[in-house]
C-alpha cells in the first residue's frame, strides 16, 4: 500500500504536445486519489498557463512573490552615448537614442539580465533591478493542498518557478506525514519547465493524442524522459478520433517498452466538466471517460505501490 | 509584414491556423514560414516542405584557458546564471546554464576566456508549395533553452519577404516573447472553455508589453461556453473566425490534412482574415 511507504512519491503528467488533456486528466486523478485515503499534495507546474485551479477550485492559504530575474536599467543622466552597451549586448536589448529619447535605453522585453552592459559601461550608468516574475501560492482545494503559481505574462524563469513550487510541495508532504504522493500537472513541450517538473519523479504519465502531431511530439517527450531515466507510462486520450493514430502509438509504445495504461475516448463530459469547474470524475462519474479514468487510476496506484 | 500565431494554451489550433493561412496566402504572396515551436514543431507535418538545408543551432559558451586564468573569480561573480563555479583550483562551466551572453569572455581581466560554439539544436530549411521558404527548428533532446534557436530562426527573415508567418510555441513566457515581440500582428487562437479564456488573458497580457495589434480565432466553437466571446466583446481584439468543433476536422488534422482541405469553404475566410490584418497593420504604421 502506498500509505505504508515512508518516502513521498511523485508523479508528473506530461504530453509533449499541448492540449492533449493533461490538466483534465490530472484533475480527475487528483479527485480519485483524494478519495482513496492517499491524501495527495498537488502541484500545477504549467506556470505560464496555470489551469488546474480552474477545475479544483482554490482558497489561497499563502501567497508569495516570485522575484527571480533582473533587468538592466540605464541612468539617462549618466549615459554619455559611448555605445559600449549596444556593442556588448547579444540580445538586441539596447535601444539607440532617438529624437524623443536622448540616452541609450534598455528594451525590457528583450533584456536577458546578463549584466554584460553593466560591466562595460565606463560611466557606471547601468544597474540591475530585481524583477517580480510572478506569484506562487499554497491553496486548499476540496481534494487536498495545491501548490501553484502564475508567471506574469512575458516573464522569464518559468523553470525556476516550477522547481520552487515542487520543492515547497515536497517539504509540505514530508512535514505532514499523512501525505504520501505528489501529483504534478506538467507543462507542454520538452524544455526547461518540463525538465524542472519531472526530474526525480517516480513516474511520468504521458497523455498522448492520436495523430501525426501527437505521435511526433510523444516521441520527443519520451526521448527527453528516457534521457533523464524517468519511468514512463502512456494513456491515449481522445482515442476514438483517429484509429490509425492509436495503432501508431501502440506500436511505438511496444517498440520502446512503455506500458499503455488506458485508452480514453473523446467524451463531451470533459469540456462540460471544465465549464462547471469540476473534475470529470466528480461532475459525471458514470460517463465513459470517467469510468476509463477510474481504471487508469487503479493501474497507476498499482505501479506506485510496487 | 510579420504575422505571429499564438495562444497561451497548448493545443488550441495554432499550427492548424498557421499552416492553412500559409497555404492560402502563398497563392498570392511570397510567404516565409517559420515554425518557432522548437520543442515540438509540427507545421512541417502539414505543409510538407522539401528540406534541403540542415544547420546546427548554437550557443557560444566560454572556454577557460586554465594556464592564463589567475583564479580571481570575477567571472564566477559576474555570471548571472550561475553557469561558472570555482571548484578547487579550476573554473568549471555548467554548459546548460550558460545563456551565451559573452560577459565573462569580454570582462575577464587577463583575457583567459575564449568562446566555442555548442550545439543545442538544429535548424532545417527548405520550401513549401514549390518556392515559399520554410524554416523550423528542433531543440536537442534534454536541452533546456529554446529561445536562442528561435532567435536564430528569425535571423532568416529578409527584407524581401512580403509576409512572414510565425507559428509560436504554447505558453506566455520567454520563447513566446522571442517569437512575437516584433510581430506586426498576432492571431490568438483560443477555445471557448475556462482554460482557453484564462490563457487568452495571459496572452493579452503579453501583448500589452509588445504593443502589437491582435485578433482572435475561436477554435472548437461549441465545445464549451460563450465566456470567451463575452470577454472579448469590449476589447480591441476582434473575433476574426470561428471554427466549429467537428469530429471530421479532428480526424482530418490527426491524419495531417490542412484545415482548408478538410473545409475548403474556409479558404476565402482566411483571405478575409489576411485583409483585416493588412488593413490593421497599415493603420498602425500610419499612426
Image (spheres, rainbow, N blue to C red):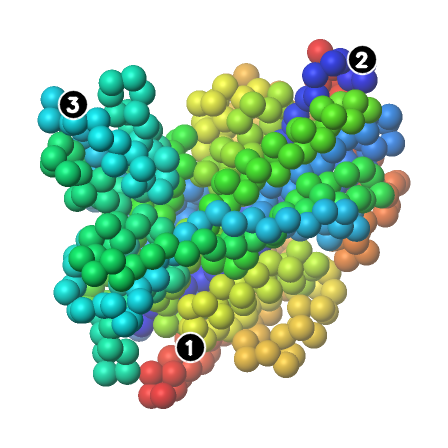
Please tell me whether mark 3 sits on a helix, a strand or a loop: loop
Closest to the camera, between mark 2 and mark 3, is 3
* Pointer 3 residue: B66
Where does residue B78 sit, x and y in percent of width and height? 29, 41
Please tell me whether mark 2 sits on a helix, a strand or a loop: helix
In the rendered image, the quadrant that contains the N terminus of chain A is top right
For residue B195, what is the image quadrant? Answer: bottom right
**In 3D space, how far apart are the residues under numbered discs 1 and 2 (Cα atoms)?**
61 Å
Residue at image location 67% in from the left, 38% down from the top: A43
Closest to the camera, between mark 3 and mark 1, is 3
User: Contact (CB < 8 A) between labels 2 and 3?
Assistant: no
Whether discs 1 and 2 lie on one chain: the answer is no
User: Contact (CB < 8 A) between labels 3 and 1?
Assistant: no
Where does residue A239 sit, x and y in percent of width and height? 66, 38
Whether discs 2 and 3 lie on one chain: the answer is no
* Viewer-side residue, A123 vs A233: A123
Sequence-wise, the earlier of marks 3 and 1 is 3
Residue at image location 76% in from the left, 50% down from the top: A60
Closest to the camera, between mark 1 and mark 2, is 2
In the rendered image, the quadrant that contains the C terminus of chain A is top right
* Pointer 1 residue: B277
Q: Is residue A136 left or right of residue A298?
A: left
For residue A260, what is the image quadrant? Answer: top right
Where does residue A48 sit, x and y in percent of width and height? 56, 51
**In 3D space, how far apart are the residues under numbered discs 2 and 3 (Cα atoms)?**
52 Å
* Pointer 2 residue: A4
Q: Chain of mark 2?
A: A
Q: Residues within 10 Å of mark 1 (few under 14, many from 20)?
A: many
Residue at image location 77% in from the left, 47% down from the top: A61
Amino acid at each position: 500500500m502506498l500509505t505504508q511507504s515512508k518516502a513521498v512519491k511523485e508523479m508528473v503528467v506530461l504530453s509533449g504536445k499541448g492540449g492533449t488533456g493533461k490538466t483534465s486528466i490530472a484533475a480527475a486523478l487528483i479527485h480519485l486519489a483524494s478519495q482513496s485515503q492517499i491524501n495527495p499534495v498537488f502541484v500545477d507546474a504549467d506556470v505560464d498557463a496555470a489551469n488546474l485551479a480552474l477545475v479544483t477550485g482554490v482558497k489561497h492559504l499563502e501567497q508569495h512573490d516570485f522575484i527571480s530575474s533582473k533587468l538592466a536599467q540605464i541612468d539617462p543622466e549618466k549615459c554619455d552615448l559611448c555605445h559600449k552597451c549596444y556593442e556588448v549586448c547579444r540580445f538586441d536589448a539596447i535601444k539607440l537614442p532617438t529624437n524623443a529619447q536622448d540616452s541609450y535605453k534598455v528594451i525590457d522585453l528583450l533584456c536577458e539580465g546578463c549584466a554584460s552592459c553593466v560591466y562595460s559601461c565606463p560611466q557606471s550608468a547601468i544597474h540591475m533591478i530585481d524583477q517580480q516574475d510572478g506569484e506562487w501560492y499554497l491553496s486548499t482545494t476540496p481534494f487536498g493542498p495545491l501548490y501553484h503559481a502564475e508567471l506574469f505574462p512575458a516573464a522569464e524563469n518559468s523553470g525556476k518557478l516550477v522547481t520552487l513550487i515542487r520543492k515547497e510541495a515536497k517539504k509540505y508532504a514530508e512535514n505532514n506525514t499523512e501525505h504520501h504522493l505528489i501529483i504534478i500537472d506538467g507543462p507542454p513541450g520538452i524544455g526547461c519547465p518540463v525538465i524542472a517538473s519531472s526530474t526525480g519523479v517516480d513516474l511520468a504519465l504521458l497523455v498522448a493524442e492520436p495523430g501525426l502531431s501527437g505521435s511526433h511530439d510523444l516521441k520527443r517527450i519520451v526521448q527527453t524522459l528516457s534521457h533523464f531515466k524517468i519511468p514512463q507510462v502512456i494513456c491515449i486520450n481522445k482515442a476514438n478520433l483517429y484509429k490509425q493514430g492509436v495503432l501508431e502509438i501502440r506500436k511505438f509504445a511496444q517498440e520502446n517498452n512503455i506500458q499503455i495504461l488506458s485508452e480514453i475516448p473523446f467524451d463531451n463530459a470533459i469540456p462540460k466538466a471544465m465549464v462547471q469547474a469540476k473534475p470529470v470524475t466528480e461532475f459525471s462519474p458514470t460517463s465513459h471517460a470517467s469510468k476509463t479514468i477510474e481504471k487508469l487510476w487503479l493501474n497507476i496506484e498499482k505501479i506506485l505501490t510496487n | 509584414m510579420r504575422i505571429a500565431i499564438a495562444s497561451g494554451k497548448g493545443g488550441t489550433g495554432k499550427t492548424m491556423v498557421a499552416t492553412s493561412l500559409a497555404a492560402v496566402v502563398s497563392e498570392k504572396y511570397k510567404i516565409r514560414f517559420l515554425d518557432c515551436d522548437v520543442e515540438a514543431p509540427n507545421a512541417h507535418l502539414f505543409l510538407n516542405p522539401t528540406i534541403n538545408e540542415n544547420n546546427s543551432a548554437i550557443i557560444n559558451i566560454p572556454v577557460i584557458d586554465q594556464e592564463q586564468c589567475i583564479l580571481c573569480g570575477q567571472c564566477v561573480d559576474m555570471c548571472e546564471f550561475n553557469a561558472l563555479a570555482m571548484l578547487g583550483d579550476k573554473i568549471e562551466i555548467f554548459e546548460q546554464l550558460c545563456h551565451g551572453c559573452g560577459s565573462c569572455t569580454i570582462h575577464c581581466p587577463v583575457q583567459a576566456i575564449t568562446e566555442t560554439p555548442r550545439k543545442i539544436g538544429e535548424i532545417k530549411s527548405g520550401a513549401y508549395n514549390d518556392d515559399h521558404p520554410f524554416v523550423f527548428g528542433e531543440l536537442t533532446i534534454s536541452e533546456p533553452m529554446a529561445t536562442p534557436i528561435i532567435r536564430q530562426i528569425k535571423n532568416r527573415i529578409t527584407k524581401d519577404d512580403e509576409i512572414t508567418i510565425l507559428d509560436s510555441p504554447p505558453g506566455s513566457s520567454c520563447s513566446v516573447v522571442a517569437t512575437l515581440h516584433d510581430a506586426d500582428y498576432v492571431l490568438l487562437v483560443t477555445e471557448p472553455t475556462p482554460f482557453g479564456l484564462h490563457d487568452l488573458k495571459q496572452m493579452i497580457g503579453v501583448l500589452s508589453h509588445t504593443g502589437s495589434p491582435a485578433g482572435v480565432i475561436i477554435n472548437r466553437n461549441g465545445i464549451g461556453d460563450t465566456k470567451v466571446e463575452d470577454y472579448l466583446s469590449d476589447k480591441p481584439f476582434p473575433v476574426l473566425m470561428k471554427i466549429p468543433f467537428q469530429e471530421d476536422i479532428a480526424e482530418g488534422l490527426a491524419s495531417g490534412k490542412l484545415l482548408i482541405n478538410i473545409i475548403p469553404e474556409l479558404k476565402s475566410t482566411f483571405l478575409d482574415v489576411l485583409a483585416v490584418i493588412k488593413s490593421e497593420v497599415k493603420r498602425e504604421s500610419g499612426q
